[in-house]
Image: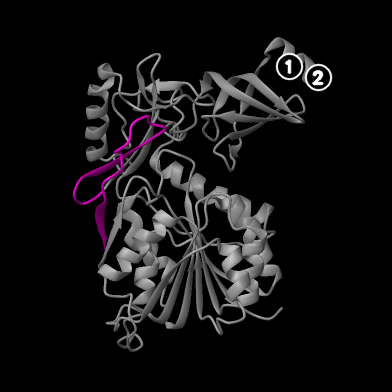
Amino acid sequence: MSMESIEEEQQTLDVTIERLLPGGVGLAHADGLTLFVSLAAPEDIVRVRIDRVSGKVVFASIVEIIKPSPVRIEPPCPYFGLCGGCDFQQLNYEAQLSAKVEIIRDCLHRIAKIEAPLDIPIHASPKPWQYRARATWQFDRSANRLGYFIRGSNDVCDVEYCAVLVPELQQALEQLRNEIPSGQLPKHIDAVSGDEGVSVAVRNVEVSGNNAPTITRRIGNETYHFSAEGFFQVNHDLLEPLIGTALGDAVGRTAIDLYCGVGLFTLPLARRFERVIGVEANPLATDFARRNIESAGLARRGTSPTVSEGSEGEGTATPATAEIVTARVGDWLRQHSVSLGPVDFLLLDPPRTGAENKDIAGILSLRPTQISYVSCDPATLARDLKKLMAAGYSLDSVAAFDMFPQTHHVETIARLSATSV
């Protein structure tokens, strides 16, 4: 069977799904072809339609489930398959967690060439549904549709109820839907939930006066100010254990927090280290980060943190020096890597694209004793870990957090320590 005939005939094939790959697609083989099948479950026997051919890879979608996988369930959301938001609702929750661990392990083996068996514990979300505290909605003015993009397109799927939203955001979505007849809704709407309610921001709007209100969220012992105009994590119920795993029992003199955002990790780091520097390119985020360290009483000089014995880093610390810098990470590292002196602990939480080459080079020039890498993409994490390990760092642990139930996305924390080059 040639690739040309597949494209011409919209060929259908019967295949068995072998496993799920990074990106959430199912892997299958048939007639000498490698198929990536969307919305599949491992061990499904399905009839698929060929949608697209790219080189030797065929992208396909399911037209009939001949024999369902033992872990396949009926997706509870009526928009599943059309809406582009979720792609794991066809799996029971235990299967979702297992698939995400295997996706991380696959990336570490295939990209970072980590051969040894690796234990990857995954922290389940306390709420597999109604967990999402941040969302972006799209509005199609010509069709009066409000919701999310349809899978693989820029058309809007009209959504009345979203099963993964926290109740406060669902209520905000309903209120926005009530405004559709007025014709005043913008094309893009961002919303985030906090302790006081919901902050809503609009983009590409023709009128002024739409600055999003500031809200707060209490995470552990820290309070964070933020708004819908900037980034804050999606699953707030997992943030306290996420921070705890990222920091571990780290204490010392100097810590660096790269891509620090509003200071999610900067504040708890400042309870443990004499000097903490947070670096972030987004000026709105750094404004919030400065406000957060000031509100916490951490933006001033004091004596070094003191940690009681046996507390594993959770002692009472006297506020130390915490500083927020607005700069591109790589540029700032290049300018300050020599003057900073010894760095005990460096945390980086880059965007999905991972760290740029100059960022990795800057980190290596600092030669921090410990590195904690927080990632929302296993593939770019593995790519960057390969560079760090080649430069003399050892991978001490990997842990996963299911920040995004019902999707293939997963948060991963990798801890490294300096060895010899």
Vertical arrangement, residue 159 with respect to residue 128, above or below: above
User: Which segment is the magenta one?
Assistant: 194-219
Q: Nearer the viewer, residue 238 or 211?
A: 211
- Is residue 79 left or right of 32 when viewed as pictured? left
Vertical arrangement, residue 73 with respect to residue 108, above or below: above
- 201 part of magenta stretch: yes
Q: Nearer the viewer, residue 300 or 174?
A: 300
**Circle 1 crowding by C-alpha within 10 Å: few under 14, some 14–19, many from 20:** some
Residue 392 visible in this rendered orientation of the protein? yes
Q: How far across and down, in percent of the image, does residue 24 sit?
A: 54, 38
Instruction: Evaluate if marks 1 and 2 touch, with contact meaning CB atoms under 8 Å apart.
Output: yes
Question: What residue is shown at x 71% (from left), y 69% (from top)?
Answer: 390
Residue extending farthest front: 208
Residue 6 is marked as 1
Q: Nearer the viewer, residue 1 or 24?
A: 24
Residue extending farthest top: 9
Question: What residue is shown at x 32% (from left), y 25% (from top)?
Answer: 185
Residue 132 visible in this rendered orientation of the protein? no
Question: What residue is shown at x 26% (from left), y 51% (from top)?
Answer: 214
Vertical arrangement, residue 76 with respect to residue 408, above or below: above
Q: How far across and down, in percent of the image, does residue 250 sit?
A: 43, 78
Q: How far across and down, in percent of the image, does residue 319 sit?
A: 30, 81
Identify the element where label 1 is drawn.
helix
- Residue 334 placement: quadrant: bottom right
Check disc 1 and give the amino acid type: Ile
- Residue 289 placement: quadrant: bottom left
In the rendered image, which residue does mark 2 sit on?
2
Check disc 2 and give the amino acid type: Ser
